[in-house]
Amino acid sequence: MSLTPIGEPRRKVTVATLREKKLHHEPIACLTAYDYAAARLVDEAGMDIVLVGDSLAMTMLGYDDTLSVTMDEMLHHARIVRRGVRHALLIADMPYGSYHVSAEDAVRNATRFVKEAGVEAVKLEGGEKRIDIIRRILDAEIPVAGHIGLTPQSTNAMGGYKVQGKSLSDVERLMRDAVALDRAGVACLYLEGIPREVASLITAEVGTPTIGIGAGPECDGQVLVFHDLLNLTFGQPAKFVRRYGDAAALITEAAQKYRADVQARNYPSDDESYHLPKETRASLETVLDRKQTLRK
Ligand code: KIV
């Protein structure tokens, strides 16, 4: 039996790989993951990028939005995901507040993601107004992913989660943001919740690969949230979500069957139980018999 895996061994994805993929018009697949099992499965499914998104605030921690998740919570999940990801590029979201106070703070927090969690790039929301901070992080040798359009950390400023870039002036602003991030040297650019036409224009204009979510099919790649993909969100999905599996149904059915088996004493069976070795069992029976006789 050969221990060599069949086919080409998978190459580690780096930020350079993303550029190569854009050049060769090869779509980039990105999915979020927040724990070890999901990280392993997603990586082994051949994903190019695994994103530890701050969407974990809702999907894993049950918060209402992404604003309350902390650096410590993000680092905790990023470390766990790191242990499960071998081939994909690992990107983590910098949480709200971790890059909004000062550039020093932003660099210190970005550095923590690299040193304490082994992430390969950090993602920040915002366009032109984040350029100085992004340059400082890049100067610290940390690749940065940009994120524009519907930026969930701006929910209060935007007045909710609304598709962005619908008016001509908004399209111009998005284009300026994209070009500024591209010139600053971001490793890739996430485009969230913008019209397909606008995402297409941006993708054609910038050298950096664009990764879309609710931004149409012309982006260089796509990202989805793990829990959306698998129906684990307990709500009506957004228009752009395509469900590829129903983990909610699977988990509910398995949990209900297990509960019923326990309550009917159908679990565990004898086969699922450990047994004493033959000799110990024989000795135990002798001891018990003796005790029985003495009691008579
Ligand atoms: O937090 C997240 O999961 C994200 C993606 C949706 C892009 O930022």
Image: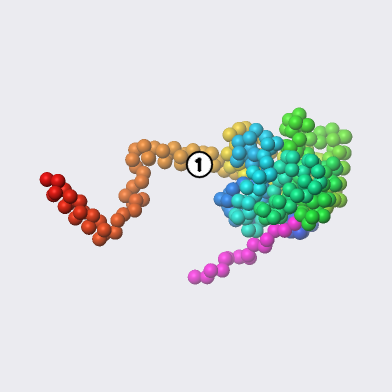
Location of the C terminus (image quadrant): top left
Q: How is the image coloured?
A: rainbow
Residue in view at x 51 percent, y 38 percent: 249
View extreme (left): residue: 296
Where is residue 28 drawn, in percent x and y? 71, 52
Q: Circle 1 sits on which residue? A: 250
Helix, strand or loop status at disc 1: helix
Image position of 132 (left or right of 153): right
Q: Is residue 261 above or below residue 274?
A: above
View extreme (bottom): residue: 1
Where is residue 152 drawn, in percent x and y? 73, 37
Residue range corresponding to the magenta coloring: 1-15
View extreme (top): residue: 159
Q: Main secondary structure of the magenta part?
A: loop
**Residue 143, can we see it?**
yes
Q: Amino acid at mark 1?
A: Leu
Residue in view at x 69 percent, y 48 percent: 92
| Residue 64 forms part of the magenta stretch | no
Q: Is residue 110 above or below residue 96?
A: below
181 vs 120, nearest the viewer: 120
279 vs 10, nearest the viewer: 279
Number of other residues with Cα within 10 Å of mark 1, as a class: few under 14, some 14 to 19, many 20 or more: few
* Residue 147, quarter of picture: top right
Where is residue 268 drawn, in percent x and y? 36, 46
Where is residue 263 drawn, in percent x and y? 36, 37
Residue in view at x 56 percent, y 50 percent: 37
Residue in view at x 37 percent, y 40 percent: 262
The total number of labels drawn is: 1
* Residue 169, quarter of picture: top right
